[in-house]
Amino acid sequence: MLERIHLSIVQQVEKQGSLTAAAGVLHLTQSALSHSMRKLEQQLGTEIWRREGRSLQLTQAGQYLLAVANRVLPQLDLAEERLRQFAQGERGSLRIGMECHPCYQWLLKIVSPYLSAWPDVDVDVKQKFQFGGLGALLGYEIDLLVTPDPVFKPSLKFEPVFDYEQVLVVAKSHSLASADYVKPHHLNKEVLISYPVDVERLDIFNQFLLPAGITPLRHKTIETTDIMLQMVASNRGVAALPRWLVQEYAEKLPIVPVRLGPDGIAKQIFLGSRETDTTIDYVQAFFELARNRLISAQASHITPS
């Protein structure tokens, strides 16, 4: 009945756009591929594709089979890779997805001792634009997710790894630089610079500006922290970032952090993984390093950086 090759064929035909191209990728002849799928359709009693002109269109059954393929094949690939690593005495790889742009500097401080402690584990880091966040974790494209917005599901484990305060960062010469805190209306004449993230996921909007019915003069997005803070230092705009990050950059740039509202905006960063992976020793070790960094920072009464 349904075999792995059938899932691979459906997935590759959708990716490559034709039976011929899919056959080439899968190292099959087109006739062998077509025969395999015709036999499956006969066994299932339903069509997988319908031909429309010179193209193939997935039926409802085919769409379902494609969804299964996209979910199951990455899991099988990962299982085979892990088993191969076990057989060869290797540890494996740790693929980390980042949904928090400014957390990259924090991650480096965890990765450095981790690489020293686990020399036989490969580490790869993917920025948000390279993967699909929660979907990538559920789909086995990544093994760990660093995010300020966890989605708690029965199959996933999320753990807070550090607390921080989101602040407004302005140039030292800015009129708000000496303020105890800023109010939403202070930003209605400011160019607000942020990372290229959906507005509804930006704390400066959903926890500060929008509840007050305020929008900035202009919203500009920049992908890199260095360029963003260079723009702020040059009085080209203001930004909202973690206080610890602003304080690090303030040692080399004329910028200052200012509290957002009288009580500030408190945030947490979470580390997430699949529940099934929490027993893997090198995954446990990464959580432990992150957890110990949080505890030591709290004991010292400082914010993790």
Image (cartoon, rainbow, N blue to C red):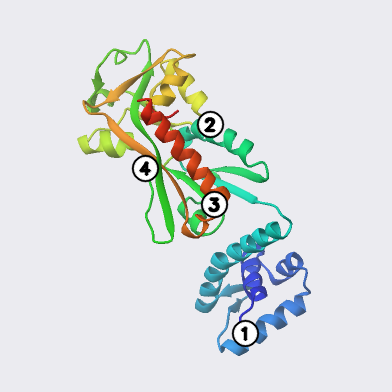
Tell me, for residue 143, which label it has, or none.
3
Tell me, for residue 109, which label it has, or none.
2
Residue that appears at 54% across and 52% down: 143
10 Å crowding of disc 1: few (<14), some (14-19), many (20+):
few
Give the answer, above or below, for where 132 lies relative to 262.
below
Q: Are marks 2 and 1 in contact (CB under 8 Å)?
A: no
Nearest the viewer among 274 and 250 is: 274
Label 2 residue SS: helix
- Sooner in the amino-acid sequence: mark 1 or mark 4: 1
> Is residue 196 visible to us here?
no
10 Å crowding of disc 3: few (<14), some (14-19), many (20+):
many
- Sooner in the amino-acid sequence: mark 3 or mark 4: 3
- Measuring from the top left, give residue 76's x and y in whole percent: 62, 66
Amino acid on which the number 2 mark rests in the picture: Lys
Residue that appears at 41% across and 50% down: 158
The residue pinned by badge 1 equals: 1
Amino acid on which the number 1 mark rests in the picture: Met
The residue pinned by badge 4 equals: 201
Q: Do the residues labelled 2 and 4 touch (CB within 8 Å)?
A: no
Q: In this view, does 34 lie to the left or right of 74?
A: right
- Measuring from the top left, give residue 100's x and y in whole percent: 45, 39
Label 4 residue SS: helix
Q: Residue 2: which quarter of the image? A: bottom right
In the picture, which quadrant includes the C terminus? Answer: top left
- Measuring from the top left, give residue 52's x and y in whole percent: 60, 76
- Sooner in the amino-acid sequence: mark 2 or mark 1: 1
In the picture, which quadrant includes the N terminus? Answer: bottom right
Q: How far apart are marks 3 and 1 (CA)?
A: 31 Å
Label 1 residue SS: loop
Q: Residue 205: which quarter of the image? A: top left
Q: Distance between the residues labelled 3 and 4?
A: 23 Å
